[in-house]
Each structure stands twice: as C-alpha cells, then as structure tokens.
Image (cartoon, rainbow, N blue to C red):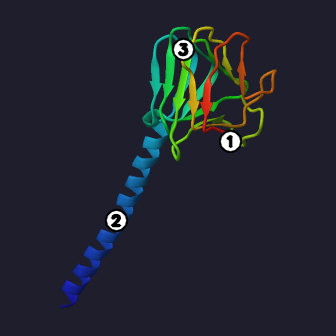
Amino acid sequence: MGKAKTDLKSVIQSLYKMKRLLLLFSFLIIFSTSTLAQTSVSDTLSANTTWTVANSPYTVTGDLTIASGATLTIDAGVTVQFDAGTSMYVDGALVADGDSGSEITFTSSSVSKAAGDWGTIRFNNTSNVGSVLDYVIIEYGGGASTGALITYKTGAFGVNLTNSE
C-alpha cells in the first residue's frame, strides 16, 4: 500500500509541474503573437491600401503621404501610433470609418504620452475623393508648426468628420 501511495503522489506532482509548464508556454505564445502584430509604416502609399486590426498597431516612423489617386482605408478598431515629429499627408483619400465601441485611434507611440508628441494629419487633396473620419479618436498630436491635430491646405476638399473626438 505504501508504494501505491508514493506512486500516486509522484503522478500528482508531475501533473502539477506539467500544468505550470503549459501555462508558461501558453503565455509565451500569446505574448509573442501580440508583439508580432505591430506594423511600421512611412514614406508614400501610392496604391490603395487597407490597414487591418490583425496588423495593428501601425506605427508611423517617418512622415507618411497618401499619394494622389490612392486611398488608405483603416478598419474599425485599428490603432495608428506616430513617432515624435511625424505626420500624415493626405494627397489622395483617407477613409477611417470606425464603429461605436470599435473606434480608430490616432495617437502617440511614446511610452509617456503628452500633447504635441507627433505632428498632424494634413489634407492636401484638391479633388473630391471622399475622405472620411468617423468614430475616430485623435490624441497627443498637434506638434507641427500649426499646433493642430488636423490641418488642410487652402483649396483642399472637405473631410466628412463625424462621431469623433
């Protein structure tokens, strides 16, 4: 009877160790997957492009231009982070169409976020291309010379801005 009791205790201890290893392994998989989802962007988008939640957050590491004739579509729930001093210039179209409870956020990439961390979203487009900002949150920007989160060039067509802060 004593040997069976020792074997049972050994099995229980082994199962406990396996459970701890399984939890640690699960944590590592989840952590590595969320780390890989980050996407760095800069330069010029010359073709129609869609940013998805699966690849969010998108980090703007240098000024980003949406070229004339191109549309950047940003899916609901995406976060766009800007490095210090970077801005987005819209010569084409920006369609950031979020949902209530799944807003699109334009924010700073800084660990200690503060007003003026990044530049602006500037609309330069001179054709009616249909830019939309709906259910978006724009925060910690305004670090460009204008001090504004959103700017537009005189003559640029309007932007449909609704349900946003």
Q: CA distance from mark 1 to mark 3?
A: 35 Å
Residue 51 x/y as whole percent: 47, 28
Identify the residue under disc 2.
Answer: 19
Q: Secondary structure at mark 2?
A: helix
Residue sitting at x 52%, y 36%: 98
User: How many numbered marks does the figure carry?
Assistant: 3
Amino acid of disc 3: Val
* Eye-nearest disc, 1 or 3: 3
Given the current orientation, which residue lies at the most extreme bottom position?
1
* Eye-nearest disc, 3 or 2: 3
Q: Residues within 10 Å of mark 3 (few under 14, many from 20)?
A: some
Q: Residues within 10 Å of mark 1 (few under 14, many from 20)?
A: few
Identify the residue under disc 3.
Answer: 129
- Left/right of residue 19 with respect to residue 63 in the rendered view: left
Q: Which mark is residue 111?
A: 1
Residue sitting at x 76%, y 29%: 142
| Residue 32 position (above or below residue 86) | below
- Left/right of residue 51 with respect to residue 92 in the rendered view: left
Task: Identify the mark nearer the N-term, 2 or 1.
Answer: 2
Q: Secondary structure at mark 1?
A: loop
Q: Residues within 10 Å of mark 2 (few under 14, many from 20)?
A: few
Residue 45 x/y as whole percent: 53, 14
Q: Which mark is residue 123?
A: none
Q: Secondary structure at mark 3?
A: loop
Amino acid of disc 2: Lys
Task: Identify the mark nearer the N-term, 1 or 3.
Answer: 1
* Front one among 108 and 50: 50
Amino acid of disc 1: Val
Quarter of the image with the N terminus in it: bottom left
